[in-house]
Amino acid sequence: MSSENRDQAVFGWVTSDNMAWLTDLYELTMADSMFRQNRNDQASYDLFVRSLPACRAFLVAAGLPQALAYLRDMRFDEAGLDYLSRVRCLTPRFLDYLSEFRFSGDVWALPEGEVYFPPAPLLRVTGPRIEVQLIESFLLNTFNAQSMWASKAARMVLAAQGRGVIDMSLRRDHGMDAAMKVARASYLAGAVGTSNVLAGQVFGIPTYGTMAHAYVMSFDSEIAAFRAFAEDCPTDVVLLIDTYDTLRGADHAVQVAQEMAARGQQLVGVRIDSGDLVALSRAVRAKLDAAGLDKVRILLSGDLDEYRIRELLIQGTQVNSFGIGTNLGTSPDDPSLGAVYKLVEDSAGPRAKLSTGKATLPGRKQVWRFHGPDGTMLKDRIALADEPAPPDAQPLLVQVLRGGEIVGDMPTLAEARERCARRLGQLPPALRQIQGYGTYPVELSAGLEKLRAQAYANAAKA
């Protein structure tokens, strides 16, 4: 095996050179047919989620910077062109077209970190038909996953009621790419940091860590393990106290904390990963406070999610932060948002799909949000892009790409994080509930309702 192939086998296969080929085959065969049929007129597509999952009151937009970089930089490299010419009967003229491909379209999008409600579009793409068709698979891959993770993390942040939420999902995530994107999406949604060192380096996210049970068991006694760790890592000591007996572990943590204080150091926290978290956290908090260690924080982990966090806090659990693994990285109650990318307009006019349960809204659109006097979200209205702006409403879709070039500065993670926090604070109180939440109104404008009726009538005759 060559060193290049060995590196790919270990570290992954998608690079800036070949990312344009991360697409479904039918995107290429359809595009080839459109090319042969000379059907490359201007077309517009919407990327949207059809409806809210049963276990979500809202969604959070994530993934826009990756999508913009892809659209700006995508190129069909020689290696991929050679491969495709050998395994599929695409026309040489179309392969020549791909060899010179540059995306030249316009994109309007929800800013990253925005809270949104289906069926409002996250993205509106307009450009030559072949171009806007070829990008479908990558865009869906990007927004489906990252918005799913950000939406899940936002619920955990709300459930924690101001206590820290830490992404500790790396070992349970579905691959390297997922681990990086989970860390980023969860920080965007309000998590205080991640255990993922590479994500910390790449994205500037604060990193957190404690120790494993194996570390404690590697010493002759628990207190010997605690002392060694405190001596070797004195600036950020969080002790895992449930390897043998949690309350005895707390006593050992108190003893080590006092020894650290004598050296001018401070124990940061203790972590409990098993058992009756309510009773144990209360007892551990009492031991720490009795020893004058009121600044020592308690971190809880162990198959937590927003439902369990809510339950623990209702029961009076003493906790400063939560470490979340599997249930953040895999989002088992809603592992896929099911976002779709559909043609809504071309040179022949508005387009609509009539499939049962999958009908679409025609035309290029804007989404308007209405707020109450206190800033609370009241409702969203999906309208046609050329309809007059309703009074006292905020447009949600902003232009982010013009002629294939990014408009303004690339959105930053810090901006997205701040926006998400602000929007979560503007949610109606009922929608901030983890269970038993209400429904947010999303209405269609009169112009869109009229166009939908006309487009459906026309489509029924096709």
Image (cartoon, rainbow, N blue to C red):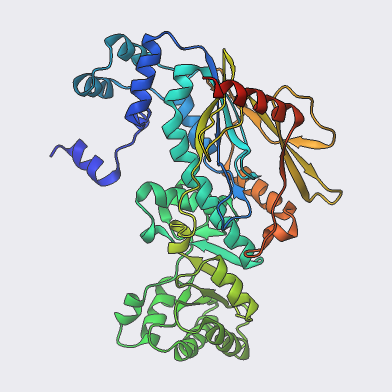
**What residue occupies the far right of the structure in this picture?**
373
Percent of width and height locating residue 367: 69, 34
Percent of width and height locating residue 387: 75, 24
**What residue occupies the far left of the structure in this picture?**
1
- In the displayed structure, would residue 127 be above or below residue 185? above
Percent of width and height locating residue 186: 53, 54
Answer with the quarter of the image where residue 46 lies. Answer: top right
Query: Which residue occupies the foreground of this view, 17 or 261?
Result: 17
Q: Residue visible at 31% across and 81% down?
A: 217
Q: Residue visible at 57% across and 59% down?
A: 192
Percent of width and height locating residue 331: 47, 57
Residue 181 shows in the view: yes
Q: Residue visible at 74% across and 32% down?
A: 445
Answer with the quarter of the image where residue 310 lies. Answer: bottom right
Query: Which residue occupies the foreground of this view, 273 or 107?
Result: 107
Q: In this view, does 173 lie to the left or right of 432?
A: left
- In the displayed structure, would residue 266 be above or below residue 450? below
Query: Which residue occupies the foreground of this view, 440 or 3?
Result: 440
Residue 319 shows in the view: no
